[in-house]
Amino acid sequence: MASKANEGLVLGVDLGGTKTLVAVIDPNNQILGRGKLSTPARQGGDAIVEVIIQAAEIALAEAGKSLEEISLVGIGSPGPLDVKAGVILFSANMDVVNYPLAARLHDRLKAPVVLRNDVRAGCYAEWKLGAGQGMDNLIGAFVGTGLGGCVILNGQVIEGKNGNAGEIGHIKAKPNGRQCGCGLYGCLELYASKSGLMKRFDKAKKNGVTSLLFSMWNGSNQKLKSRYLAECYAAGDRLVIEELQRAAEYLGGSLGGLVNLLDPGAVILGGGLSLALGEPWLNWVREAAKQHILVFPAEGEIILPATLGDDAGVLGAALLAREVTRLAD
Ligand SMILES: [Zn+2]
């Protein structure tokens, strides 16, 4: 069955705090169809399963394929997870606790389901198919609603004792900092991702600061799309630029520390916010990192932009699902 799974079509699922992307992927890692819907992050696990199914139907229709042709499902999900049991333990950005996502999806899709950390999936795809091809030592940092990370050393994804290594978003960034969605205080995610930026923008609005952003976005009861930030940046909006620079300083400083710790070939900067903002964001993070890297290479850059865009998560989820199934063969 396992080898058959590797020959057939895989559904790659990228479950994010803001959106859910599902793709039909062939054995050559070509995407045949995509479905993208908003994640009902505050409505519990069953609502999330429904949205994954709906997005899968859209992707299958676009690909001209049927569910019966799917031999394997790979999901990248925010965590922490119990990957063996296929369970989401909890999530800083979704109201889900001890939810057996793999089992529930298996009931609906009738194919084996492999659940892995979303950022690890995206990073794995960037390593195998994108910006990190051919490198044996990499750090991935994905900035979106939250901030996730992944470490690849000597050609292996570092899983850690409990399978949850790589949570760079929950490195302590500020003593006496605010409480993070994970329950801890002062996490880097609060200062270097959209969930943190939202709090800063709320505060600025309350203090009467004017910004183009407030004509697009009403406050943290509403999702903050990365596109809004890109538009405000392009329009020269002072508040948004200042806050993004502040976030980049926090992120770059911590990434510099990780470079000192691990001496990787590259840090791949991805995620929705990085994709939407592009070069200016990349350069701010690079500048901040450079100030905190002990030995900077004479040539080239350490921090590289992710190259697979929105598809990194679904491609990585599918690749990891094939890998897991092949190893179990
Ligand atoms: Zn945290």
Image (cartoon, rainbow, N blue to C red):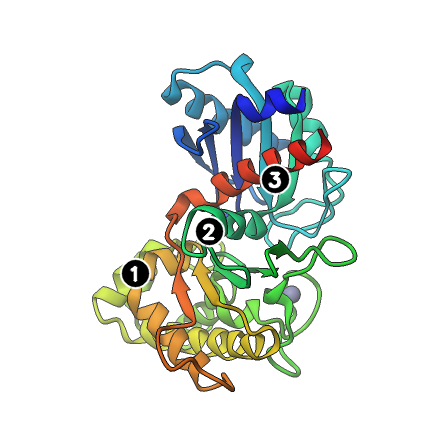
Vertical comparison of 121 with 258: above or below: above
Assign a secondary structure to mark 1: helix
In whole angstroms, how far apart are the C-alphas of marks 2 and 3?
A: 31 Å
First of labels 2, 3 by sequence position: 3
Amino acid carrying mark 3 in the image: Gln
In whole angstroms, how far apart are the C-alphas of marks 3 and 1?
A: 29 Å
Viewer-proximal residue among 303 and 103: 303
Residue 252 in sight: yes
Amino acid carrying mark 1 in the image: Ala
Task: Locate residue 190 relative to residue 23 in the image: left or right.
Answer: right
Closer to the observer: label 2 or label 1? 2
First of labels 3, 1 by sequence position: 3
**Residue 20: where, in percent of width, then height?**
49, 39
Give the residue drawn at x 65%, y 83%: 175
First of labels 2, 1 by sequence position: 2
Task: Find disc 3 in the rendering and name its residue.
Answer: 43
Label 1, residues with CA under 10 Å away: few <14, some 14-19, many ≥20: many
Q: Disc number at residue 230?
A: 1
Assign a secondary structure to mark 2: helix
